[in-house]
């Protein structure tokens, strides 16, 4: 197809989008909402997966010592924990070191901890590393029986909850995105159908003078692609600005919460949104043209 012909068909499609007015706005808005939901679900799921990986790579079990335990008792407890089956390492963390680590995680908001610096409420603890995830539960029960250990925190339980939550988000997101994608295809299809009806006389004349079926159909395909791409650009702009703002806000308020960096995530996500918008637009127009354009 020659460049001049492509320009003519594109101009016809743009003119049709302008003529349809409110229907075009409704179609673009529907695409934008659908893709925005897809982007939000994707960002949430990806960050939950990242958080799960980060937590899974860190300490699996934390043993907190009794407040009245002496240094000798804590040392003896650490040695007993090291000797437990499936334990690959133990790191003693004093209450002072724990407070320093907490202050580091708070970053610029470490001033919030000034009230507890004089009376540190954190206990001495031991970070316990286990060889396999499946052996954590047994290690927790064994550590709980060690003298001077007041309580044991199983980090894997939190990881499992995050994994289950991520899976639920995926299923819910798949349902919502599928429903909104169907609505998008219907809205774009109806918009193209109106364009077909408005140009029925022109289409009849074109057929009489020998225009090919492809030449008649192409402007409607391009119109659907324009509507889909327009909605994708709107959702992409919202996601680009919104996630960068959210990442900055979370880094300032909750600096120890690991979120994926916008620079590594957003370009690929926006590209996916643009491709999805084009696909939805082309699909909606193709279905409508096939049903309502008798050529």
Image: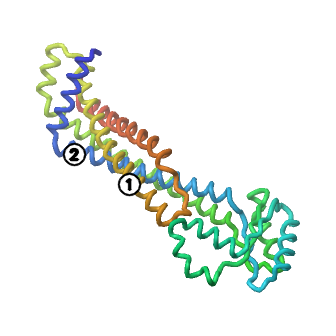
Along the viewing direction, whichever of 292 and 45 lies nearer the viewer: 45
Picture colour scheme: rainbow
Residue 94 position (above or below residue 288): below
Residue closest to the far bottom: 68
- Is residue 290 left or right of 115 when viewed as pictured? left
Q: Position of residue 95 (x, y in %)?
A: 70, 76
Mark 2 nearby-residue class (10 Å; few <14, some 14–19, many ≥20): some
Residue at the image point whose x is 74% and y is 67% from the top: 127
Residue on which the image places disc 1: 242
Horizontal and vertical percent position of residue 156: 68, 63
Mark closer to the observer (1, 2)? 1
- Which quadrant does the C terminus fall into? top left
| In this picture, residue 284 sits left or right of residue 18 | right
Residue sitting nearer the eye, 171 or 246: 246
* Drawn side of residue 190 relative to residue 61, left or right: left
To which quarter of the image does residue 58 belong? Answer: bottom right
Q: Residues within 10 Å of mark 1 (few under 14, many from 20)?
A: few
Marks 1 and 2, the one that precedes in the sequence: 2
Q: Secondary structure at mark 1?
A: helix
Q: Which residue is mark 2?
A: 25
Q: Is residue 258 above or below residue 203?
A: below
Please tell me which residue is depicted at 55% across the width and 58% down the height of the picture: 258
Q: What's the mark number on residue 100? A: none
């Amino acid at each position: 197809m020659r460049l001049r012909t492509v320009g003519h068909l594109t101009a016809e499609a743009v003119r049709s989008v302008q003529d349809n007015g409110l229907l075009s706005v409704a179609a673009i808005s529907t695409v934008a909402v659908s893709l925005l939901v897809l982007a939000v679900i994707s960002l949430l799921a990806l960050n939950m997966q990242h958080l799960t990986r980060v937590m899974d790579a860190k300490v699996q079990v934390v043993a907190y010592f009794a407040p009245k335990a002496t240094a000798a008792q804590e040392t003896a407890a650490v040695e007993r924990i090291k000797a437990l089956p499936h334990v690959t390492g133990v790191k003693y963390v004093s209450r002072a070191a724990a407070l320093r680590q907490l202050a580091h995680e708070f970053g610029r908001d470490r001033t919030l901890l000034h009230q507890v610096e004089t009376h540190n409420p954190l206990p001495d603890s031991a970070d316990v590393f286990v060889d396999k995830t499946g052996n954590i539960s047994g290690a927790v029960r064994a550590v709980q029986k060690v003298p001077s250990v007041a309580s044991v925190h199983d980090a894997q339980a939190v990881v499992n909850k995050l994994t289950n939550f991520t899976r639920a988000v995926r299923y819910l997101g798949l349902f919502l995105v599928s429903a909104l994608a169907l609505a998008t295809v219907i809205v774009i299809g109806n918009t193209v159908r109106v364009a077909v009806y408005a140009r029925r006389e022109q289409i009849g004349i074109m057929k009489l003078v020998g225009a090919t079926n492809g030449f008649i159909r192409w402007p409607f395909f391009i119109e659907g692609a324009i509507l889909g791409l327009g909605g994708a650009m709107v959702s992409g702009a919202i996601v680009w600005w919104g996630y960068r703002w959210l990442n900055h806000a979370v880094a300032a308020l909750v600096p120890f919460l690991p979120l994926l960096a916008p620079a590594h995530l957003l370009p690929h996500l926006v590209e996916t949104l643009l491709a999805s918008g084009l696909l939805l637009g082309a699909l909606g127009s193709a279905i409508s043209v096939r049903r309502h354009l008798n050529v």
